[in-house]
Amino acid sequence: MTTRTPEQLRDALVADIGSWGTFRTGQVEAAFRAVPRHLFLPGVDLETAYAPQVVVTRRAPDGTALSSASQPDLVAAMLEQGEVHPGHRVLEIGTATGINAALLAELTGPTGHVTTIEIDEELAASARSALAAANYDQVEVIHGDGAAGYPDGASYDRIMITAGAWDLAAAWWDQLAPAGRIVVPLRLHGSGLTRSLALDAIEPGRLVSREALVCGFVPLRGVGAHSGRALTLADGVVLRVDDHDPVDEAAVRAAVHSPSHGLWTGLTIHDHEPTAHLDLWLVTADTRFGRLTVDTARHDGRLTPTRRWAGATIHDGTTIAYVTLRPLAPDTDELGVTAHGPRAVTLAAQLTDLLHHWRKEGPTEPVITAHPADTPDDQLPTGHRIDRPNSRLTVSWKP
């Protein structure tokens, strides 16, 4: 039980988000002060409804989250990416609880319009009721597959996707207004590596990212779904890799039980350096990338991938090498490498070389350019190519 009112709890949540420097505009901050989150989370106590954390609202039989109220700080960051203004027409993909649709309605104001699509009929009905109870009558809730968009309301100044997407659906390309923007948590690798991208329509058939934020989201369901490939290597140890990478699963399982080969690189990083995209840079460095997750409560502690880059790992199908850290000072760490498997010495050296190259090159911010899937190679910019059914993505780097 809480003795604080919803208004006091909202103020506390806004203060927490503000302490991270997430708010860039008064409009997004004001939207968070206005939306009564508890009305969208029936059965959730007030303190939890306004806590700065994810609230899972539906799970699959295996325990996997199917729907949630996303981490409020990330929601705020994506709304700032969207730069939604009064009068805008907005399409949201993934209604879930309806909280984000309410925030968008605050930003678009009485002259704007928000259409939100939810694939789960029960969730759509619940969100529709909650939005009505909170007096957001200007939000239109559609039960359907977000990959199809909603052509009856097109075109849209902003398309906001609030679930992890594997591709840019053809309908989103078609329904975006000229000079519009798509904000999408896009999975840029089969391991699940995701960035929230603010993609601006520069010209017909070309979207360019303004900003990329590290994030994780419940994946989209429906025709645009993509589950990825996860290999269970030991109790509490999972390696996520690209679908097309050849992997000898028995060999990699044996590798994690073999002695480790470790190196310290001599490279130091500080807490406030712009290093968030090291894992994405490794994806673009012409190597086989993966993400190693270790549940320390279930594993014996021999595997120590750093969580800073979500277990960034390279592999050759039989051997793995992952990034580690050790503290040198309160705000400084040294980069290290640990490898397991028959080619541990070779792969550890390869990852060490890559880290030295990354430090020398100094990439900070990725620039992702998207073109339709039928775009010829000679019309694409230089960079790392990612081909998906509906789009061709190119990743380049700002120094």
Image: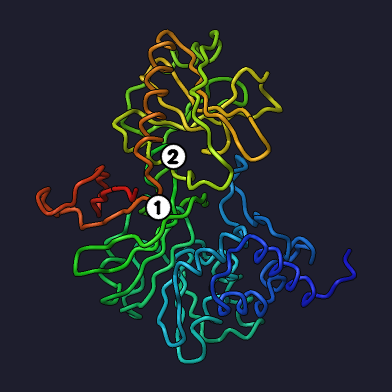
Q: Position of residue 39 (x, y in %)?
A: 70, 74
Question: Is residue 177 shown left or right of residue 362?
Answer: left
Q: Looking at the figure, which quarter contains the N terminus?
A: bottom right
- What mark, if any, has residue 278 been given in the picture? 2
Question: Is residue 283 shown left or right of residue 265?
Answer: left
Task: Between residue 356 and residue 69, name the one nearer to us.
Answer: 356
- What mark, if any, has residue 357 been given in the picture? none
Residue visible at 44% across and 44% down in the picture? 277
Residue visible at 26% across and 56% down in the picture? 370
Tag 2 and tag 1, C-beta contact below 8 Å? no
Task: Between residue 361 and residue 204, name the one nearer to us.
Answer: 361
Q: Position of residue 234 (x, y in %)?
A: 57, 20
**Looking at the image, is 57 positioned above or below residue 131?**
above
Disc 2: CA contacts within 10 A as few (<14), some (14-19) or many (>=20): some
Colour scheme of this structure image? rainbow
Quarter where residue 278 is shown: top left
Q: Residue furthest bottom?
A: 111
Element on which disc 1 rests = strand
- Kindly identify the amino acid type of the residue bearing the numbered disc 2: Leu
Of callouts 2 and 1, which one flags the residue occurring earlier in the amino acid sequence?
1
Q: CA distance from mark 2 to mark 1?
A: 17 Å
Q: Position of residue 205 (x, y in %)?
A: 19, 64
Task: Between residue 248 and residue 79, name the one nearer to us.
Answer: 79
Q: Is residue 199 among what the camera can see?
A: yes
Task: Between residue 44 and residue 106, name the one nearer to us.
Answer: 106
- What mark, if any, has residue 186 been given in the picture? 1
Quarter where residue 98 is shown: bottom right
Q: Position of residue 375 (x, y in %)?
A: 14, 54
Element on which disc 2 rests = helix
